[in-house]
Amino acid sequence: MKEVLRDIDGWRRAGKRVAIARVIGIEGSGPRDPGATMAVSSDGEVAGSVSGGCVEGAVVTEALEVLNGDGSPRLVTFGYSDDEAFAVGLTCGGTVHLLIESVDRW
Amino acid sequence: MYEALRDALRAEEPVALATIVGGEPLGAKLLVGPQRAPLGTLGHPELDRVVGRDALGELEAGLSSTRHYGPQGQARQDDVSVFIESFAPPPQMIIFGAVDFTAALTRVAKVLGYRVTVCDARPVFATAARFPMADEVVVDWPNRFLAGAGPALGARDAVCVLTHDHKFDVPAIVEALKTRVGYLGAMGSRRTHAERVVRLREAGVDDAGLSRIMGPIGLDIGARTPEETAVSICAEIIALRTGRRAPSLRSTEGPIHAGSR
């Protein structure tokens, strides 16, 4: 979290909205522990990470949907066993659970 | 809530953030810490009380986890899942001896997130200009400095004695052994370390104390330069914390990551 604060504050000062995605649980092999955080601005800028680079692209899409929708938080799971595995799964075979929220709703 | 968490993190105040991640209201938050009144709510005062208590416990242990409760905080129910994230202040590394190895170790320790203090009794060498990456450079005798700083040290912290001068390092190690510090390493050749052990015994250190000392310091990776030695020391600190023997991953089997703690 700490490593993305500066970016979040900068984006908010510039009038952008910000979503925060946090790892809240992992099963099996996962590159980042619970608490790993990625922030996404309403312009699609990114700070931090929640995996080894496997799912970040999909997280940006989900985060922008949270910001452009009604602002409700969203639970997202990425895992090898998912139907989407070949598109955005973790190559390590693990499963990662994320909570994506709009900072304005914190 | 974001501003409160941000300000706490900037001030390195220990806090834990509890967020509902299963059940309603999804995303509700409670921020707690030993130095502050609870902020926010998870939707019910009893749930707040129970989760607040658990969160302070997780924070004390430096753990983050998801816990399950009844709607009013009841145990052994799972209507509500709460992710408790601990934000403990950074671990401390205290390095005794202001030498080239110290500058390299400071750099690697900063990469790993340590708050680094360099301490040496010689004012000519212990300068902030020589160790720009250090959070603090102290001119003092190591044992006297530790007498003040020691009580705050815990399992996540490290003391590295790089002086390899018995005059400084024996009293420093004796003082460090009185603390709960998780890693205590002492630099020097095998001969230097053998002499040091004799002197430490003369100073009253017993077998249990000697077994805590990682000396000669570092993992056996053939390090030569100050930078390579710094990697060797930091790798040993990680391996000691996780209880691994530190061979190469390709010559072992089993999960790559230590248990999520």
Image (tube, rainbow, N blue to C red):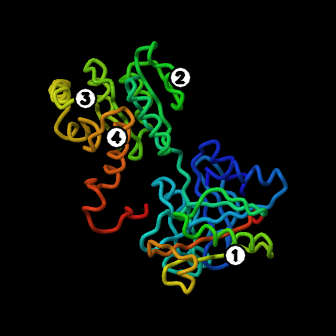
Query: B192 above or below B46?
Result: above
- Can you identify the residue that label 2 sits on? B128
Q: Which mark is residue B188?
A: 3
Is the residue at mark 3 from the same chain as the one at mark 4?
Answer: yes
Check if mark 2's residue and mark 1's residue have beta carbons within 8 Å: no
Mark before the other along the chain sequence, 2 or 4: 2
Structural crowding at the residue carrying mark 3, measured as other residues with C-alpha within 10 Å and reported as few (<14), some (14–19) or many (≥20): some
Q: CA distance from mark 1 to mark 4?
A: 46 Å
Q: Disc 1: which chain?
A: B
Q: CA distance from mark 2 to mark 4?
A: 22 Å
Query: B229 above or below A7?
Result: above
Q: Nearer the viewer, mark 2 or mark 1?
A: 2
Q: CA distance from mark 3 to mark 1?
A: 58 Å
Q: Amino acid at mark 2?
A: Ala
Query: Is B139 left or right of B2, judged from the image as shown?
Result: left
Query: Is B2 left or right of B206, judged from the image as shown?
Result: right
Q: Amino acid at mark 1?
A: Pro
Q: Which mark is residue B25?
A: 1
Q: CA distance from mark 3 to mark 4?
A: 12 Å
Q: Disc 4: which chain?
A: B
Q: Quadrant of the C terminus of chain B?
A: bottom left
Percent position of residue A84, x then y? 57, 83
